[in-house]
Image (cartoon, helix red, strand yellow):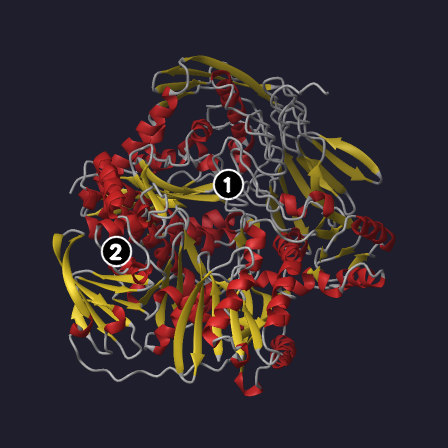
Amino acid sequence: MLVGIDIGGTFTDFAVSENGGLRVHKVFSTPCDPAQAVLSGLDGVTDGDRGVVERVSHGSTVATNAILERRGARAALITTGGFRDILVIGRQTRPELYALQPRAPRPLIPRRWCYDVPERVDSQGRVVMELDLAALDAVLDDIERQGIESIAVSFLHSYVNPVHERAVRRRIRERGLLEGWQIALSSDVLPQFREVERTSTVALEAYVRPVVHRYLRRLEEELPKASVLRVMKSDGGVVSASRARQQAVHTALSGPAAGVIGGFRLAQLAGYDHVITLDMGGTSTDVALCPGKLVQGSQSGIDGLPLSTRLLDIETIGAGGGSVARLDAGGILRVGPESAGADPGPIAYGRGGREVTVTDAHVVLGRVDPGHFLGGATELELGPTRRALRALGSQMGMTAEEAALGVIEVANAGVDRALRRVSIARGYDPRDFTLLAFGGAGPLHACAVAEQLEIPRVVVPPHPGVLCALGLLLADVVLERSRTVLAPLAEAASDHLQGELDEMGAQARRDLMAEGVEEEAIILARLVDVRYRGQSYEMTIPFEDDLAAAFHAAHAATYGHAMTARQVEVVNLRVRATGLVDQPAMSPETVEGTTGVEARIGDKVCVVSGLGAMGVSLYERERFSPGAAFAGPALVFQMDSTVFIPPSWSAQVDGYRNLVLQRL
Amino acid sequence: MGVDAISLAVFQHLFASVAEEMGVTLQRASFSPNIKERLDFSCAVFDGQARMVAQAAHIPVHLGSMPESVAHAVQAFDQLRRGDVVVLNDPYHGGTHLPDVTMVSPVFVANRAAFYVASRAHHADVGGMTPGSLPLSTELYQEGIIVPPVKLIEGGERNEGVLKLIAANSRAPDERMGDLEAQLASHRVGERRLLALVDAHGTDRLEEHAVALMNRSRRMTERLILQIPDGVYSFEDFLEGDGQSEGRVAIRATIRVDGARMTVDFAGSAPQVSGNLNAVPAVVHSAVWYCVRLLASSELPVNHGCFEPVKVDVPAGSVLNPDFPAAVAIGNVETSQRIVDTVLGALARALPDRVPAASQGTMNNVTFGGRVGGAPFVFYETIGGGHGGGPEGEGLSASHSHMTNTRNTPVEAIEHSLPVRVTNYGIREGAGGRGRCRGGEGIRRGYEFLAATTVTINSERRTIPPYGLRGGEPGQPGINRLLRDGEAHVIPGKATIQVVPGDRLIIETPGGGGWGEMEEPG
């Protein structure tokens, strides 16, 4: 049995593949001890016999929450002499441009536990000042007195020559101060130039590593010895739990990655290769563009702190089903970023919510049906919801329905802007893409935002609410190695680069095999980060013999121009080693042409944008036969979501039970 | 279909996203670290009457000065044609200081310019006396190439001559070319996007909403001014010499609040000076609007409407409205900070419970350059400092304040490409002024030069400290030192020096002023 497990704020979701079948399962999350929900859910899907589990792929929010809630380890930082304050100064910007008194995010490591030691390596890797061992010992004396659990070490230019960082680790071990795993070197965690990002990343690593370490050890102890436990990283790949314990911070932005993997894989399976994923949940919406491949981003952060691990290029906005709608001081309708969250949630949930949310707007428009919400398990409060929308509408001189349509339109405008940022602003035409909609609210909004961007097709997977768990089940093992070169291409001989890449590739291959991946399942991608000399951001492109030509072409494709006369600089070499995991057997079912009548449960009158009240057909998702075809306006209810199909859209259920929606 | 709360929200998103996409394009395609890494640029959308509808600004000093550029670009020609892009940097014709190169282009619908898009980027070198183009100058001609509004693209045809001319006047011509191309790319994106909006919604509906959004921002600004008690509030502060002489240069602001209208009058400010810290009125407008924006909630989108209720008077011939060809190199970066200090100081008299004490009041501009083995190098950076303490608590330490928010350049990037070593970069403890809420701490940054280099420093608050308020003490002034042969020499706030290998420069930036009296111990 293969299991994908995704821990969310409210539910912990399971996707299970067994004997060629695929099923899903949900239990309530246990935020105080997330492992509890994981284990009880596993017992649920295995009928108490955990021994049948061969592989668990897990999306862990342990690192993320430790950072957001500041519940990490007592960590210390050791830097190059004179740079002790690097975490406080950061990039020396303030987070808000227009604030009478701007605030900065609180660093994870207090200044008291930031230390510096005289040493210096120059940009070419030459030692220009030896590491001052006496000063180091004095620092370690103090660290010992402070009861520190983990130490981050980040020296300038250590990406070229880590000799002094390693000497610090050796000294800590000699003194028996901490175990090896409690020491994080920046040259191991992120061997790349730009000291602020590298130092912040390794500080985050030291801060979360002990917490992640304890959590994963507990899970491993509870799982059968023969099973494999893997954890998702921010780049969308999974690694073994033992590796994740050494790269804890690489899991910190993994939350949205699993959904992108699941969405892209399902879309590919259904025959769509150019995909934009739209994951609209309760508090936020994530969009990602996959032009036939997963796209990696690099610059990022968490809670205002720089974090430069590899991650999928995902744009997040603060608008979801739980986002609050209100008129602002200037009389404009705003949706989000404030959210009613899971508790109290929308007014319609009847748990004390008083502020109108996007979900409430759908309820008033009849798009979230009381009889079908969460499979009918929860009652919806129609009266108070309608009264609240009527009050909002009267402030704008509108009916409750008009106000509800407005709330959705404004939410969609925000989603539209995010979709443009990932597509048009990066040189892609959304008309060439399929929108894959999931999350509880995604399928309600997908057709409207697709219309705005002229995206011709929307695909809604069979279980839009548990796509992340499925993504975990489908995710490959990915290890990436990088090495900073920072040399003009003309000087870096191609065979030298090739030699370095070969060496990195061989190492990555050994690492993957140590993860239990079969040699024939390994795919190596050799990549380079290149830029024009003088530019300060790189493009990652596949390594080729004529690297300059490849870079000019890539630059022209992305930015509209190339500068062929300029010197090209190689910044980093990268090897991404992918270990293909056994995919659950998924083959299409036989498609029979029906009109969807088998799933039709009636119709009702709903208010539709621009058209007023009209009859809308109602369907139940699980009763469709593959091949069913029908036209909007329609609502398709299912346990974890609702699909809204506007007039002038057609729908077809494909062999994988995806709903494929197309503009007529 | 009229204008309502929903369509306003939708069109606000649409206009903002045009400016945003232009900004993304400019950043991604640009070359110089100053634009790409430090984000020293802004993009904006204007209506057919050259009123600003939306902007994506990273730098407050660009906030109110872009409209001037569009006005001058339009005035300079009988008629702009479809496919024109105007470029300018002349501070006396729509610019601010020469490194800020602005482009303006009309977006034609049918036979008229229904919209304009504009971009401004700080180019690291546009010629002049010293590398980095922020020299200790006495007239504009010494500060770099002067570009009056000229057509860089005329009816779709590139004027390669103009491009080459601008690039050739820079110490880094390739970089200039790359950055100018990036600005052009952002204009292509802006135009394409606006035309798509015209297709989707029609010009009438777009214009109707542009006007409604401006009216809304005007009303919000008026409401904000209404909350300031009527009255006359004055404040005076000083700059510390113009780089030619040490004499104090007064900046005096008198704010008159009358209902929903506000006038900021700079009468009483010093006459123009011979050195480089004169500021053109566009810079003054930016600084004033920045202060007004600080009082607003985050929901006030900046557009033409915000500017209407605030009148700014700058006396002709003063340091804030100099006559051509007065030098203006650092009016944008230093004088603008002092304008903020005086306007906020005056506002503090009206709103004593809201306004914090003075922040560091300088950008600590460090420019240097030279040649290594025949190849030129140029570098510009600014250094953060302390923010003022205030009613909400202590001032922020070691970060940029008020008119700038540019990022630092990574030490590893500096050392990789320049013959300099950054020896230390940390918090300058004890710099924040004491008080119930103390001022933020400054920064101490040290450089060791590995080659003969020309260094120009333009810094302020070296003798007159950032003020405290409500009994709080002033912050510590900054100090610049050169260590040569084991001896420390204090360098004036504004100086050009020649350094030799082994010389070390240490910049200590000011702390913020304290706010409120210290509580009695015990």
Question: In the depicted view, which residue is nearer to us: B202 or A218?
Answer: A218
Residue B99, numbered circle: 1
The residue at the point 31 percent across, 82 percent down is A588
Which quadrant is home to the C terminus of chain A?
bottom left
Could you tell me which residue is drawn at 48 percent across and 80 percent down?
A: A1
Disc 2 chain ID: A
Q: Please indicate whether residue B121 sits to the left or right of residue A533 in the image.
A: left
Tell me where residue B120 appears, x and y as whole percent.
43, 43
Task: Determine if residue B151 is in view.
Answer: no
Where in the figure is residue B403, as x and y percent of width and height?
A: 51, 34
Instruction: Give the amino acid at mark 1.
Output: Pro
Q: Which mark is residue A530?
A: none
Residue found at the very far front of the displayed protein: A48
Q: Are marks 2 and 1 in contact (CB under 8 Å)?
A: no
Q: Chain of mark 1?
A: B
Q: Which residue is mark 2?
A: A370
**Element type where label 2 sits in the image:** loop
Q: Look at the numbered disc 1 and give the secondary structure of its residue.
A: loop
The residue drawn where x is 46% and y is 23% is: B321
Q: Nearer the viewer, residue B210 or A471?
A: A471
The extreme top residue here reads B231
Q: Quadrant of residue B522?
A: top right
Residue B412 in picture, x, y percent from top left: 66, 54
User: Total number of numbered labels?
Assistant: 2
> For this view, does A379 lie left or right of residue A473?
left
The relative height of residue A433 versus residue A99 in the rendered view (above or below) is below
Residue A79, how many percent across, how many down? 73, 52
Q: Is residue B234 left or right of residue B157?
A: right
Q: Residues within 10 Å of mark 1 (few under 14, many from 20)?
A: many
Badge 2 and badge 1 in a common chain? no
- Residue type at the position of mark 2: Pro
Q: Residues within 10 Å of mark 2 (few under 14, many from 20)?
A: some
